[in-house]
Image (cartoon, grey):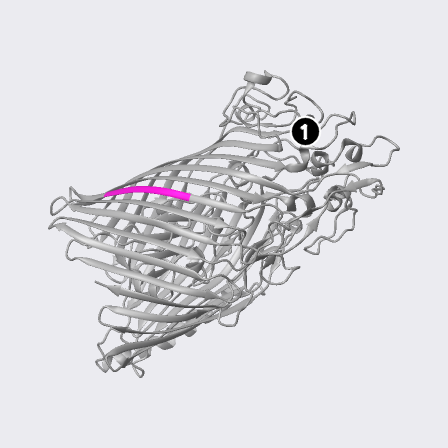
Amino acid sequence: MARNLSGASLIVIASLILPSQSLAQENQSEGVSEKRLQSIVITATKRDESAQDVPIAVNAIGAEDLDQLNVSVFTDYLTQLPGVTAGGGGGPGQSTIYIRGVASTTPATTTAGVAGLSPNVAFYLDEQPLAQPGRNLDVYAADLERIEVLSGPQGTLFGASSQAGTVRLITNKPNLDEFQANVRFGTAFTESGDPSHNLEAMINVPVTSNFAVRGVMYTDSQGGYIDNVPGSITAEDSARFRAEGTMRDNGVAVEPFRAGFQAGADLSNVDFKAANNQNLVEKNFNDTVYTGFRLSSVYQINDEWKLTTALAQQQLDTEGVFFSDPDLDDWEIQRYSEDDTKDSYTNVSWTLEGEVGGLEAVYTGAFTDRETDQTVDYTDYLFIGQYLPYYICDASVTYPGAGTDPSGTCYAPDQKVDISNKLKVQTHELRFNTPAEHRVRATFGGFYSDLELKEKNDFIYAGSTEVLGFDGVTKGFAPNYPLTNTEVTGEVGSASPGYYSDAGPFYAPTIFRNDILRTDKQMGLFGELAYDIVPEVFTLTVGARAYDIEVDFEGSANSSFFNLGSSTDAQRAGTNISAQFSGEGSSTVDKAATDGVIFKVTADWKPMDDVLLFATYSEGFRPGLLNRPGGASNAAGTYTVPFAVDTDDVQNYEIGWKTMLFDSSLRINGSAFMIEIENMQTTIFDPNITNLFFSDNAANAEIMGVEADFDWAPDAIDGLTISGAVSLLDTEVTEVLVPTDDVLVGSPLSFAPEFQGNLRARYEWDMGEYRAHIMPQIVHSGESYTDIIEINKIQLESWTTAALSAGIAKDNWRMEAYVDNLTNEAAQYSGNFTYDRSRVSLARPRTVGVRVGVDF
């Protein structure tokens, strides 16, 4: 796309708004008064306001639309929102949200805790932010009031990680006025996949005139659709033996300085044992089960004060993986160790609302406890791990001595990672609003959050217990202990006292262990002031947020290097993170601490009823982080990994419009924007520098874009509603800040398709005593890339999917049949090239289902 999008955006704005104004006036003069489209009430500005009256680019999906679109999980609502994408593709609970193409690198789940970038899109469950590196909280969409997606920086009101936008899941609250209950259930059949079933039940009970409770429970079993097919592999494919010029799977050749340590060696005397997956071959091996409940209450203390509380729990269990190998057939992969995830969370929240001195006062707090236990097949690391053969091959293979050809045995390279991830988050916010009817209005308050993440990752190489040491007799590696536990090894090598979750020794085949305590403390003072320069016509809003953030790491990244053939742990390898970031070690860095102030200015103009125009300048930020391999340098000595990575900053320039025309039968909203990104954080894996993932502020970038959506209920056809949305993006790296050829000026940002769009039509009509409907839908996305690092990215192909649903309703029940992915498109939703192997997440194959809902 040529970089003249700002001119195109003006044409789009003119064509969408200007002709419609006179037509709207004409309809109004004819006295048409029926309101065909309704505006959703949202809280994007921390106040209850109509979405059409808020000068923010916000896409709100209400309860009715969520039901019609059959939205239940993370990927369901992302595909409905042009300009919103997901990176990583690891499956439920393992993706990262991106908005408007503000994306560089997605953390791998195996290193997300120790090396993952903080998300740049905030994810809220009601009032609590719950974003986590590499692991979105995949809240099942049961009994939701709406989903709000706020595009562009929202940091003045929503804080850190609202750099590119904010996604908010708003739950239904208890109703004091009436008893309510409903049941929804369904079943579906996926082409060449396993069947799926779901059940959801809700009850709302007004216990007294001022106290009510509401409960919802759900279970959703989603059948697998990816096949684990037969395969075998040996360590001969290791990057250690790879010659320069070898073409990687993504089409990028191996540079001379990245050639294998033993490239060109005579391997004829090496016995390479094969790993095969014959015991794991299975059709449709990626099953998913969501189970959970939410119980909430509201207590109307008096006319001015109200207390709302909620308790939610969810268990998410998955097997297999949710990506495929594009070198195999669609929906096929080869995995050599078991993959499974158990992800559970408990969320407790409370909100106290009332009035103090003429001000609306809101105190909201929440506590979330999340635990994830996961096993990941790590065999693909073979393709980038130069040192991996050292751990699974005899020493006579990897270090044969000068003038000697390698000989001996390399054992099967099937590896896995056992992950234990424990997250605790508490948040508190106190805010005040002046009366909405005042000419001068203010929202102001304070925010505090405390995040604690404990992550223990064991990298298990089964063959490591069989390899022969340098004496040709002794097998395996010495028992390994945390670098931070000196009770057994003493303060030898890099060992010194610090945090650990397990005293050791590690399970024998465990070659590496990351045992990390990551904390993130945030404090903020925020405020927005709106002044009606011309009441009900022209308003100026200014906002600011002062923030103070501290990110700290403790623990250790442990390695068995130097332990081959030994009986004691030398503690000479790995990183003692507690010592490195004590403020007194070699790095002199204690925490990734930052503070500052960000600003927002918005001018909005209502030239006539139901037309809102606005212009905004806004800023966003996200926390920095610490690098465990800080201080490592490349061979040329031109680059050193920083110990601490700074925040990256976003400046957003935006003009937008919101229109409700033809007596509310046509709604057209949109915006045109330019985003400047400074010091973009990027995660890099480059064995020429270090054999560990690290991050840096690698580049500056620029984004230009236009997004628009519409809803039309034509008067000429009763019961018909047509809706659509479009996103146009032009992204590019404008400056490279690190001495590398791996980031190129002019290259696009990741997960940023130049074009995305969707279109759907819903037609309802009376059929005797029934109300019938039919709804076709089409969604399209252009091609995109998975990273800004040339050696670590692949291209995702453009795709188009279609869906169709039809049903009937009568009184308190409804039934619907549907077909998702009507054309059975292998749509590439996401992907990665983390270990020099292309992995793409494909849409679920054609799925036919039926669902039923009953209200009581």
The kind of secondary structure the magenta stretch mainly shows is: strand
Looking at the image, which is closer to me, 87 or 8? 87
Using residue 484 as the reference point, say whether residue 606 is left or right of it. Answer: left
The answer to whether residue 514 is seen in the rendering is yes
Residue tagged by mark 1? 561
Find residue 240 and report its horizontal and vertical position in percent: 75, 41
As shown in the figure, which amino acid type bears the numbered disc 1? Phe
State yes or no: residue 833 in magenta: no
Q: Give the range drawn in magenta.
A: 344-351
Using residue 412 as the reference point, say whether residue 663 is left or right of it. Answer: left
Residue occupying the far front of the picture: 279
Looking at the image, which is closer to me, 57 or 139? 139
Above or below, 716 against 574 in this view is below
Find residue 607 and report its horizontal and vertical position in percent: 30, 67
Above or below, 396 against 753 in this view is above
Find residue 387 and report its horizontal and vertical position in percent: 71, 36
Residue occupying the far right of the picture: 403
Which quadrant would the N terminus be assigned to in this image? bottom right
Which quadrant would the C terminus be assigned to in this image? bottom left
- Identified at 57% across, 22% down, the residue is 585
State yes or no: residue 346 in magenta: yes
Looking at the image, which is closer to me, 679 or 286? 286
